[in-house]
């Protein structure tokens, strides 16, 4: 395969990617993650291989299952079970491990890798997985004409070629230390099936994973069944799964507490303690964050002192304890503290109203009035009045404008705003700092339009740091990322207020080896139902 795009930072995060996924996932989902998977495992005698897993899903089913474009919270997590990459990130540990690959990529030289496909691997229609399918899968993502949402995640790749029927060679534009973390972005699909009916494939996907999709009915359920000929590292331990689409929080809680379902995502914070009396409930620290974003073309928010002042004004302890019932951690850097690549930023925004007032006075913005845009996401609506309260207290007269995410971003994209607060979490697609920072600070709609920061010298400095970091390794790479974290904290153009925790509930009496994930969704890889 020949590379289709020139290597430049400008292609890394296209407008379509930043816009469509941000809406889909931000409404919903970590470097090395907080929770390690339980290695104890149940033996075959403890699991009923004929059982059906019943789950409660909180988000709506929409969009395609085609992994080249799938961005919805539900379809992304469903695809963990339907498809495989060559190397995938474990949904629980967020660590890379061979999936369709027989082993991790073999490094031939600094920019060349060879990968063997798992022997005997087949798609769910019975066709063998070949190197031709692998090359095709990468070609369709890397070809800009296909408008893949994930091209920018793998734009370090130069060529993908078939060495023989079950071996591929990947070359990169430059030494890239994160290759194992990124290969799973591309899920391997059957060339013949996609070419025969791409539209049909989008609604009736065929992968090489442990579960096949039987049916998917919006507002009802998604039905899976075991793929009996799967021979990979995560064989299905249940005969099938029913993912009940329960957007109403009370309906999910009722279904969980009565035993109708065995696991549920997105436990309402107010119901955590009550539900804990009848189920296991764990709040896992995630990358998912609430950020404050400024239009830097609108004075006085072109002045970093004003942006910093609004951060110092926030009583984050009160916001988290009252609005989130403790289910968040105040940001001390771009990454949460449990991440492997975390480094405390040079600027940490503690609650300091006097400093906030002083910064506003120094910037000549003491008599400031703003309309604060926010989304109507449930937990965001809980904290928005508390943010207003803090800003009002330092003399920033604040009017809240709460609306649906699409409507809010329509206003943001038109430039008709000054300050916005919104949720986001790209970690469902990958967890390395480069990917996460480029989500919001790449050459895309966020930097070019939403914050209008792309023509500043500080943005050029950040871009240079990110370009340097991906070509480095070890301490040198980490130190470069640390400089980026510091710059982001000082500029506060789009910066996290807190990283939230994700409460998940499940029945430990019914499910064996279930663990909550630190992103949006549920994973039932290596999970079974206890035999009665």
Image: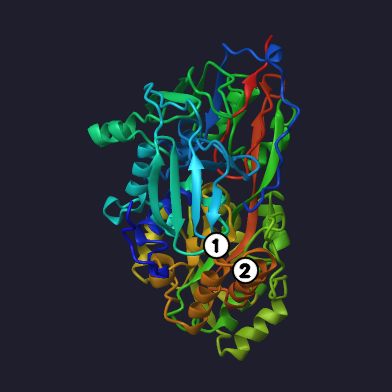
Q: Position of residue 496 (x, y in %)?
A: 60, 63
CA–CA distance in space, label 2 to label 1? 8 Å
**For the view shown, which residue lies furthest in the left direction?**
196
Colour scheme of the picture:
rainbow
Q: Position of residue 412 (x, y in %)?
A: 40, 66
Q: Nearer the viewer, residue 136 or 166?
A: 166
Q: Which residue is mark 2?
A: 481
- Residue depicted at 64% across the width and 52% down the height: 500
Quadrant occupied by the C terminus: top right
**In terms of image quadrants, where is residue 103?**
top right
Q: Which residue is mark 1?
A: 434
Secondary element at tag 1: helix
Secondary element at tag 2: helix
Label 2: how many Cα within 10 Å (few below 14, some 14–19, many 20+): many
Q: Position of residue 117 (x, y in %)?
A: 48, 36
Q: Are marks 2 and 1 in contact (CB under 8 Å)?
A: yes
Q: Which mark is residue 478?
A: none
Is residue 152 in sight in this rendering?
Answer: yes
Q: Position of residue 397 (x, y in %)?
A: 55, 74
- Residue depicted at 39% across the width and 54% down the height: 159
């Amino acid at each position: 395969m020949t590379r289709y795009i020139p290597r430049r930072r400008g292609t890394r995060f296209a407008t379509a990617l930043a816009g469509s996924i941000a809406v889909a996932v931000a409404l919903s989902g970590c470097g090395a993650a907080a929770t390690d998977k339980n290695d104890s495992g149940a033996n075959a005698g403890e699991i009923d291989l004929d059982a059906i897993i019943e789950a409660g899903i909180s988000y709506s089913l929409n969009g395609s299952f085609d992994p080249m474009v799938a961005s919805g919270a539900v379809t992304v997590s469903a695809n963990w079970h339907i498809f495989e990459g060559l190397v995938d990130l474990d949904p629980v540990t967020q660590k890379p491990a061979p999936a369709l690959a027989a082993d991790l990529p073999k490094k031939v030289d600094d920019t060349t890798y060879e990968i063997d496909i798992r022997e005997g691997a087949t798609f769910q229609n019975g066709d063998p997985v070949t190197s031709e399918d692998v090359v095709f899968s990468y070609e369709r993502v890397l070809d800009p004409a296909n408008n893949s949402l994930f091209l920018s995640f793998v734009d370090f790749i130069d060529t993908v070629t078939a060495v023989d029927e079950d071996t591929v060679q990947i070359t990169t534009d430059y030494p890239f230390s994160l290759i194992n973390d990124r290969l799973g972005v591309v899920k391997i699909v059957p060339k013949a099936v996609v070419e025969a009916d791409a539209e049909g494939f989008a609604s009736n996907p065929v992968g090489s994973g442990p579960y096949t999709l039987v049916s998917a009915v919006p507002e009802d359920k998604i039905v899976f069944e075991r793929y009996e000929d799967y021979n990979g590292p995560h064989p299905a331990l249940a005969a099938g799964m029913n993912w009940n689409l329960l957007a109403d929080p009370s309906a999910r809680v009722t279904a969980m507490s009565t035993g109708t379902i065995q696991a549920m995502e997105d436990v309402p914070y107010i119901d955590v303690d009550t539900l804990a009396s009848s189920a296991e409930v764990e709040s896992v620290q995630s990358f998912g964050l609430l950020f404050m974003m400024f239009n830097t073309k609108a004075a006085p928010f072109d002045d970093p002192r004003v942006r910093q002042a609004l951060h110092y004004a926030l009583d984050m302890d009160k916001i988290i304890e009252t609005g989130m019932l403790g289910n968040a951690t105040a940001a001390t850097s771009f990454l949460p503290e449990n991440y492997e690549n975390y480094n405390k930023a040079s600027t940490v925004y503690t609650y300091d109203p006097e400093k906030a007032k002083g910064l506003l006075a120094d910037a000549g913005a003491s008599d400031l009035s703003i309309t604060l845009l926010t989304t109507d996401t449930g937990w965001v609506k809980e904290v928005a009045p508390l943010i207003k309260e803090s800003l009002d207290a330092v003399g920033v007269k604040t009017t809240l404008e709460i609306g649906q995410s699409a409507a809010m971003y329509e206003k943001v994209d038109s430039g008709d705003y000054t300050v916005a607060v919104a949720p986001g979490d790209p970690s469902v697609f990958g967890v390395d700092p480069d990917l996460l920072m480029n989500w919001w600070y790449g050459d895309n709609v966020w930097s070019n339009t939403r914050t209008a920061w792309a023509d500043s010298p500080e943005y050029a400095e950040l871009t240079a740091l990110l370009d340097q970091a991906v070509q480095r390794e070890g301490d040198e790479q980490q130190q470069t990322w640390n400089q980026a974290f510091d710059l982001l904290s000082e500029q506060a153009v789009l910066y996290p207020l807190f990283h939230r925790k994700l409460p998940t509930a499940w029945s430990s009496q019914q499910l064996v080896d279930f663990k909550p994930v630190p992103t949006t969704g549920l994973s039932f890889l290596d999970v079974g139902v206890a035999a009665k």
